[in-house]
Image (cartoon, rainbow, N blue to C red):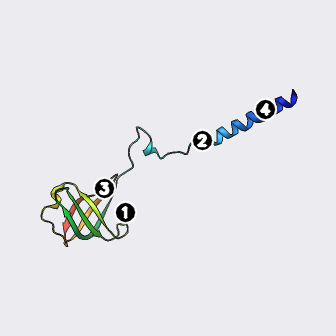
């Protein structure tokens, strides 16, 4: 009987230790229900317009690195916010711009012609 109690105590101890160690991995606060989304990052860039889609309110820019966003030089699409930013722009035009990265497609919030 004593051997059985000792075996039972050992099993319960191991089961308790395993349960304590099997805690779920912590999620970032922004991923938890009711918590605000991750902070939006902003930055300023320079580049050349390679494509404009006025219907969708988007443009593609081949830009230099944008350190504040952690972006290397690349060609990427942006949503123009507001879409009227696209008025008067041309493919091949050099610009400087303000960008915003949240969730989804990055946004251009200001454009200055060079």
Closer to the eye: label 3 or 1: 3
Instruction: State the residue position of label 3.
Output: 105
Say whether disc 3 or disc 2 marks the residue closer to the N-terminus. Answer: 2
Judging depth in this view, the residue of 106 and 43 nearest the camera is: 106
Say whether disc 3 or disc 1 marks the residue closer to the N-terminus. Answer: 1
Left or right: 102 as drawn, with respect to 10: left
Residue 50 x/y as whole percent:
23, 69
Instruction: State the residue position of label 1.
Output: 68
Residue 6's place in the image compared with 78, above or below, is above
Q: Decide: few, some or many residues near mark 1? Use Cα within 10 Å; few <14, some 14-19, many ≥20.
A: few
Q: Decide: few, some or many residues near mark 4? Use Cα within 10 Å; few <14, some 14-19, many ≥20.
A: few
- How far is disc 2 from disc 1 in space, using C-alphas? 36 Å
- How far is disc 1 from disc 4 in space, using C-alphas? 57 Å
Judging depth in this view, the residue of 57 and 99 nearest the camera is: 57
Left or right: 95 as drawn, with respect to 3: left
Q: Residue at x 42, y 45 (%)?
A: 30
Q: Residue furthest left?
A: 88
Residue 63 x/y as whole percent:
30, 69
Residue 55's place in the image compared with 5, above or below, is below
Instruction: State the residue position of label 4.
Output: 9
SS at badge 1: helix
Instruction: State the residue position of label 2.
Output: 23
């Amino acid at each position: 009987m004593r051997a059985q109690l000792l075996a039972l105590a050992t099993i319960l101890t191991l089961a308790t230790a395993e349960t304590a160690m099997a805690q779920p991995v912590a999620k970032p606060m922004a991923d938890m229900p009711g918590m605000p989304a991750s902070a939006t990052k902003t930055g300023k860039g320079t580049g050349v317009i390679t494509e404009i889609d006025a219907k969708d309110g988007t443009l593609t820019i081949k830009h230099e690195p944008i350190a504040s966003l952690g972006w290397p030089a690349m060609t990427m699409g942006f949503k123009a916010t507001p879409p009227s930013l696209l008025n008067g722009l041309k493919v091949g035009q050099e610009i400087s711009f303000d960008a915003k990265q949240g969730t989804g497609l990055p946004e251009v919030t200001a454009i200055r012609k060079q």
